[in-house]
Each structure stands twice: as structure tokens, then as C-alpha cells.
Image: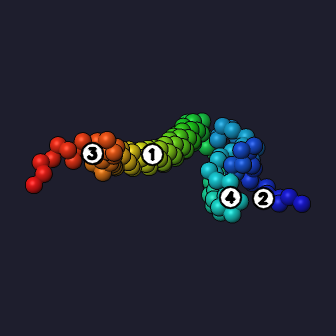
Amino acid sequence: MAFKLPAHLHRNRFGTLYFRLTVPVDLRAIIGQAEIYRSLGTASVRHAADSAQTLRIALRRLFEELKSMSGEGMDEAAKAALRVLIDNRRRNARDMEAREELEHRISRMKSEQFRVESEHRRVLEAAQAAHASAVAQAFESVAGSAESKQRVQPRMTNAQKSQLQQDRPST
């Protein structure tokens, strides 16, 4: 049986958990939306539950304050100012999420760059080692062939030996 998520958590198709809370009907005109839906930036239920609980408590407290203020008779200018404040906070939250996403992308790019540079360094070192080995083998081959030429003396035939003995002056 699958684990059931708390009512204020929702998982998208990629596994990321979102906070979800319905705005009370009487405050929807002030807040400008029926539901608050925000990414918690994690797939871990444990971490998301803590963040969601904090958000839920803060929003419930805000809703209570707004209800008490509207009960006292909020005029249209105050409602408009409150809407502007809420829109600014919403925009700031989106900007912060976008910034965090960009920072995460930069971090991934730096990690990838480090991995690629390490791989290039490893390939370069292997190529240098192979080159050094090939040069050493070529040098040994050249040196070995020179030694073998010095060691190999031409064998004289019997006719050449007798000729050599005749050419020597006898004492």
C-alpha cells in the first residue's frame, strides 16, 4: 500500500512536493486567488512536511488576522493596498524560487565542468604516458639495432681465411 501524503501536500509527476492550501471564501477577494500552491523544492516527505507545516501555520495566522481586519470594516483602499502587498510578496517568492533554480543550475554546470576537466586531464595523462612509452621503445629499438650491428661480425669463409694468412708477412 502506498504512503498517503498529508492533505496540504501534493506531488507533481516529477516527484517534487508542493504545498497546497485553500483560501477561505471570504478572503479570496482580498488575496486574489482561491488556492495557494507553492513548490517546496524537495521530493522528501520528511523535509516537505516540516516546511509545509510552517507555511500552514503562518498562513492560517494571516487568514485570522485578515478576517479580524475585514470584520472591522476594511475600506476599498485598504483592500487594494493589501492586494498590492500580497502581489509583491508573491512576486518576491517567485523571484526567489527562480534565483534558487538558477543557482542550482549553475551548481550542476560547475559540477559537470569539473567532471569533464578531470576526464580530460586523465585522458591527457594517459596519452602522455603512452607517448613516453612509445618513445622509450623506439629508442631501445634503435639502440638495440646499433648494438647488434656491432656484435655481428661477418663470418669468413675458408677461402677468405687462407687469403688472409697468405697476405700476412711471415716472421
Secondary structure, mark 3, is helix
In percent of width and height, residue 106 lies at: 47, 43
- In the image, 101 versus 122, the foreground residue is 122
Q: Specify the amino acid type for callout 2.
A: Pro
Marks 2/1: CA–CA distance = 51 Å
- Mark 2 or mark 4: name the one nearer the start of the chain: 2
Secondary structure, mark 2, is loop
Residues under numbered marks 3 and 4 in contact, where contact means CB atoms less than 8 Å apart: no
- Residue drawn at x 13%, y 51% is 170
Secondary structure, mark 4, is loop
Q: In the orientation shown, which residue stands out farthest toward the front?
A: 171
Q: Specify the amino acid type for callout 4.
A: Ser
Query: For residue 148, which numbered disc appears in the image?
Result: none
- Mark 3 or mark 1: name the one nearer the start of the chain: 1
Query: For residue 162, which numbered disc appears in the image?
Result: 3
- Mark 4 or mark 1: name the one nearer the start of the chain: 4
Q: Specify the amino acid type for callout 3.
A: Ser
Tell me the quadrant of the picture where the N terminus can be found: bottom right
Marks 3/4: CA–CA distance = 100 Å
Query: For residue 6, which numbered disc appears in the image?
Result: 2
